[in-house]
Image (cartoon, rainbow, N blue to C red):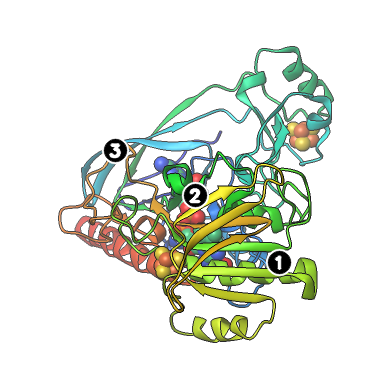
Amino acid sequence: MAPVIATNETIVVVGGGISGMTAALEAAECGKQVVLVENTATLGGRTAILYRYFPKLCHPTCGLEINLRRLKASRDIRVLTLAEVTRITGTRGNFSVTVKRSPRYVNERCTACGACAEAVKTEVPNPWNYGLSKMKAAYLPHAMAYPQRYVIDPSIIGTPEADQAKAACKYGAVDLDMKEETIELQAGAVVWATGWKPYDAAKIQPYGYGRFANVVTSVEFERLADPHGPTGGKILRPSDGKEAKSVAFIQCAGSRDENHLRHCSRICCMASLKQTQYVREAYGDAAQSTVYYIDIRAIDRFEDFYAKVQKDQTVKFVKSKVARIAEDQATRDPVLHGVDTEGYHRYANRHDLVVLAIGMEPSVRGADIPAEVVEDSSGFIEPAADGAMVFGAGCATNALDVNRATQNATAAALRAIQVVNHVSRAES
Ligand SMILES: Cc1cc2nc3c(=O)[nH]c(=O)nc-3n(C[C@H](O)[C@H](O)[C@H](O)COP(=O)(O)OP(=O)(O)OC[C@H]3O[C@@H](n4cnc5c(N)ncnc54)[C@H](O)[C@@H]3O)c2cc1C
Ligand code: SF4
Ligand code: SF4
């Protein structure tokens, strides 16, 4: 790898989702040197594994493609994937940053031809499908992956399969001698854009996630609807592969609950409204979506989308916090129990599939991050708190949709630029 040149006018951005990419691009397009550190094998974060975006229902390729084009055109951004920041010392304007980079075992000669994957039999869980499918141990993370370069999974290193992958590569791109590297950088400012993670649905015990096969989370449902996902885009029940035409969406699953996440995750009402349209797209007038909600939070221009979904004959709304889910053991149908608060009727409603509109938890919560940060009561980073070493950006700072996450990241980039401009003026 060419050495990473960094000075105390460099901005380090940690997290290569849409927010980190935006912060990096905005800073680089203002003439700053940026090092973008992502801990998986690809940029794009969780946005890249959504099927469609609300409210226009366009594919995430639109937004990401534009950013990737800008990134490829920039000479001022150095991207480090499979990399983590392990130490930050110093103060704003003068940091030393240590980055640990794991081996990909594939170098820049890779053409993404896929011959190494064909030569390998071992499969590993696919994290970009939330573990709903497996992938070969020589893999490209997903179709939109950047860099477009395969990875040899560490689990087969040292086995004959790794040698077979190497032998299959006509371009000399498989390098089984790659080792973990430690990279020391100087930086003037650090932007922390490590995003969010889905709340652990198994902790919401009455909903039976993990016990009942036909209870899935909203992030898993994105993958079920996606043609690149585990079912090739067919909305099928995990228990028996049957078409799931009657789908229940349970709102606030884990959010707005002192026992789980106290905050409103802000996007999950919109995500479920959007996902009712996936069911309609799959099954036309035979689709039956039921949204169980406390109140629907569709802010600003999203209100129009809510109004449009309300007019859809295939979508029904039940104002109720579902109390519990049981499973019909013969059919594996999930049966929802609760009280409809508009008529005060008790219900026991049977569906083919339940989708939990799972809350967004800050990825920094519970993580051991090597920087002093100020967190709010939900564990999100206060974006520019006094005394904090890093500037938070995107969903590391709050539960945000893509539009708001990128606006927030642009603001973080501006704060970082102000710091390095100050350094540069002080030194001239
Ligand atoms: C079910 C669902 C559907 C949604 N649908 C939509 C939609 O239709 N429209 C919309 O606008 N929004 C939608 N969202 C919200 C959208 O996913 C977020 O706005 C978006 O992911 C925010 O991007 P981000 O870059 O801030 O975070 P992330 O996407 O989480 O990216 C963070 C990146 O940081 C990396 N990272 C994490 N920790 C580290 C570390 N320690 N070191 C280095 N890198 C690290 C991660 O690997 C990742 O690449 C949806 C959310 C959910 C739950
Ligand atoms: S590593 Fe080699 S065989 Fe594998 S995709 Fe890249 S170029 Fe093709
Ligand atoms: S956005 Fe909707 S579903 Fe999500 S926590 Fe807020 S109210 Fe509940």
**Where is residue 304 drawn, in percent x and y?**
54, 87
Q: How far is the residue under mark 2 from the one under mark 1?
A: 21 Å
> Which amino acid lies under the numbered mark 1 shown in the image of this protein?
Val
Q: Is mark 1 within 8 Å of ligand 1?
A: no
Q: For this view, does 233 lie left or right of residue 397?
A: right
Q: Secondary structure at mark 2?
A: helix
Q: Secondary structure at mark 3?
A: loop
Name the image quarter holding residue 213: top right
**Where is residue 233 drawn, in percent x and y?**
76, 56
Q: Secondary structure at mark 1?
A: helix
Residue at the spot of label 3: 370
Q: How far is the residue under mark 2 from the one under mark 3?
A: 36 Å
Closer to the chain start, of discs 2 and 3, is 2
**Image quadrant containing the N terminus:** top right
Residue 137 vertical placement versus 176 (above, below): below
Closer to the chain start, of discs 2 and 1, is 2
Name the image quarter holding residue 115: top right
Can I make out residue 197 in this image? yes
Q: Residue at x 28, y 65 (%)?
A: 418
**Where is residue 193 drawn, in percent x and y?**
40, 53
Camera-near label (2 vs 3) is 2
Camera-near label (3 vs 1) is 1
Q: Residue at x 78, y 47 (%)?
A: 241
Residue at the spot of label 1: 279
Residue at the spot of label 2: 207
> Which amino acid lies under the numbered mark 2 shown in the image of this protein?
Tyr
